[in-house]
């Protein structure tokens, strides 16, 4: 899940790259990760995870970050490429935040992407996020007050967004 030199230069220019941690054992039942898996509709069957109506095992990975500077981590959920999500190249990512009632809610939807990068900007106190895809295009998302919405595409390699 690494990108070529162009993304490395972009990362150095705008901030820290957030990528999934190495595949780990199942999360503790009382952990935020376990709650996020459940909120994402993932169900454990033995040591593998599945979503309803999809027979393909998924390989969830998580990364924590604080997108709104409130001192509480949100959780990025990365899933390897799967026919469960259509023809996404590389993988899919969702961002979960715990709401006031304690439930974990998805702020992005499962987007095609393999890396998430705070771009340095903010809207309504939430970090702007770039979701990078194989092929050199990064979709930029801004917080609109209730969810993240697509704002633009940014080429991270020459010609990276020419067909988007």
Image: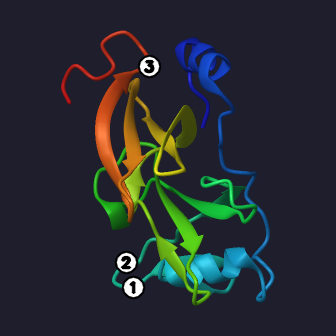
For disc 1, the marked residue is 52
Disc 2 to disc 1, C-alpha distance: 6 Å
User: Could you say where residue 117 lies in the image, as x and y percent from the top left?
Assistant: 56, 37
**Mark 2 / mark 3, whichever is N-terminal:** 2
Examine the rendered structure and indicate whether residue 61 appears above or below residue 135. below
Residue 121 point in image, percent of width and height: 51, 34
In the picture, residue 66 is in which quadrant? Answer: bottom right
Could you tell me which quadrant the C terminus lies in?
Answer: top left
Foreground residue among 14 and 133:
14
Q: Between tags 1 and 3, which lies in front? A: 3
Report crowding for label 1: few under 14, some 14 to 19, many 20 or more residues within 10 A (C-alpha): few
Above or below 136: residue 116: below
164 to the left or right of 97: left
Where residue 97 appears, as percent x and y from the top left, is 57, 70
Front position among marks 2 and 3: 3
Screen quadrant of the N terminus: top right
Q: Which mark is residue 54?
A: 2
How crowded pointer 2 is (Cα within 10 Å; few <14, some 14-19, many 20+) is rated as few
Q: Which residue is mark 3?
A: 156
Q: CA distance from mark 2 to mark 3?
A: 33 Å
Horizontal and vertical percent position of residue 14: 60, 23
Furthest-left residue in view?
Answer: 163
Is 34 drawn above or below residue 80 in the view shown?
Answer: below
Give the SS element for disc 3. Answer: loop
Name the residue: 58% across, 83% down.
Answer: 100
Ranked by sequence position, the earlier of labels 1 and 3 is 1
Left or right? Give the position of 67 relative to 158: right
Element carrying mark 2 = loop
Label 1 secondary element:
loop
């Amino acid at each position: 899940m690494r990108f070529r030199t162009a993304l490395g230069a972009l990362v150095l220019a705008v901030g820290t790259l957030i990528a999934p941690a190495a595949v780990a054992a199942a999360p503790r039942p009382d952990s935020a990760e376990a709650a996020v898996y459940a909120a994402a509709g993932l169900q454990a069957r033995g040591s593998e995870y599945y979503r309803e109506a999809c027979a393909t095992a998924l390989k969830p990975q998580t990364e924590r970050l604080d997108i709104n500077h409130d001192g509480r981590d949100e959780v990025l959920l990365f899933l390897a490429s799967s026919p469960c999500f259509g023809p996404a190249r590389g993988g899919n990512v969702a961002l979960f935040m715990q709401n006031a009632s304690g439930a974990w809610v998805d702020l992005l939807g499962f987007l095609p992407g393999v890396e998430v990068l705070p771009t340095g900007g903010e809207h309504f106190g939430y970090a702007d996020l770039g979701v990078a895809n194989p092929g050199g295009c990064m979709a930029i998302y801004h917080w609109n007050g209730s969810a993240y919405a697509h704002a633009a595409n940014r080429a991270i390699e020459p010609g990276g967004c020419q067909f988007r």
